Amino acid sequence: MTSNETIKRGEFGLTFPVRLVSDVRKSQEWYRNVLQCHDISGYGHATRGDGGGMGLIVITAASSEDIHPNAVAQKHTDEPAEAASQEYGWDSLVEVAWDNLTYIIEEVRKRGGKITVEPYEYAHGGRLYKKAHIADYDGYNIVLSANRLQTEEPTSHQPEDKFIKTVQVRLVSDLKKSLDWYKHVLGCDEVTDSGYARRGDLEAPYPVMEVILQQAVSPQDVHPNAMSAKVRDVEGLWEGPDYPWDTFIHVSWEDVSLIVEEVRAKGGTIGMEPTESYNEGWVFLDALITDPDGYSIILGGMRRSEEA
């Protein structure tokens, strides 16, 4: 391929952070009862809608030592002291409306959830920010976040238990190197110095892939997911993948190979070539891309076996 040729891009679809947990059923129960996730599947899903909402996949850790909630990240030098908790890391960031944040925290508390950081506010760059932290069943930290202009008055409508969207947070050993990789190798359409990376058009009807990259204080704080345990002979529960998962991205069948070739052409590492598997009348086509810190990004296509 010459430098003048355009590399054809595939479209990323629905994206799920993947977490290693001590007990899939108990973790899903927590997400159902405390965060009101409505879609609980045998494949480890825990999702809620609300026109964005949240979604993740939980799989069984082979050892309790493989469960690593993120440590506290290195603080940005231009941020006010109030911008980050000094005790808790971020595993996911949930955007909510300003008037909803405190209400959601109280609803989570009523349902037995653990609030690790009570709602707090700070000002930065002409905006007001409000955040609070929730710890899930395995201690992963979910950060609720809202913001508005300092000149904007909050509305007085009835607050709702509503999530806008959820973004996975990832600790990296070299933020500048990772931002460069997500922009030039994974092909993200927006990458900011603050660590935000997105591939996909926010105005398009299909979903986008979003991640927040944070500089780790120490390389020892960077923990890509280990190989999960195999859960066999448990009715209705998937036994787990054959390789580590950190992020799972649904893409069309044709786009799996298209994205792999795009990333390969840009110098990316393909941890696993597109591989087919079969289960309950479905054919799955998965490929694995490895980022600079060894995080596994899974591209997953699927179709009915009669279509194969």
Image: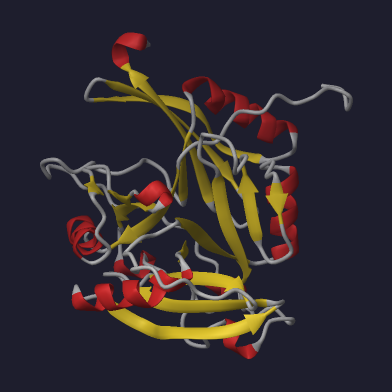
Quarter holding the N terminus is: top right
Residue 290 place in picture, x, y as percent: 58, 46
* Residue at figure coordinates x 48%, y 25% from the top left: 252
The picture quadrant where one finds residue 241 is: top left
In the rendered view, how is the structure colored? Answer: secondary structure
Residue 104 place in picture, x, y as percent: 33, 71
Relative to 197, is 104 on the left or the right? left
Relative to 116, is 110 on the left or the right? left
Q: In the image shown, does 267 or 95 lie closer to the viewer?
A: 95
* Residue at figure coordinates x 55%, y 76% from the top left: 153
User: Vertically, is 18 above or below 278?
Assistant: below
The picture quadrant where one finds residue 161 is: bottom left
* Residue at figure coordinates x 73%, y 82% from the top left: 77
Residue 69 visible in the displayed image? no
Residue 125 place in picture, x, y as percent: 72, 77
Quarter holding the C terminus is: top left
Residue 199 visible in the displayed image? yes
User: Vertically, is 49 above or below 273?
Assistant: below
Residue 203 place in picture, x, y as percent: 60, 40
The picture quadrant where one finds residue 236 is: top left
Q: In the image shown, does 198 or 204 lie closer to the viewer?
A: 204
Labels in figure, total = 0
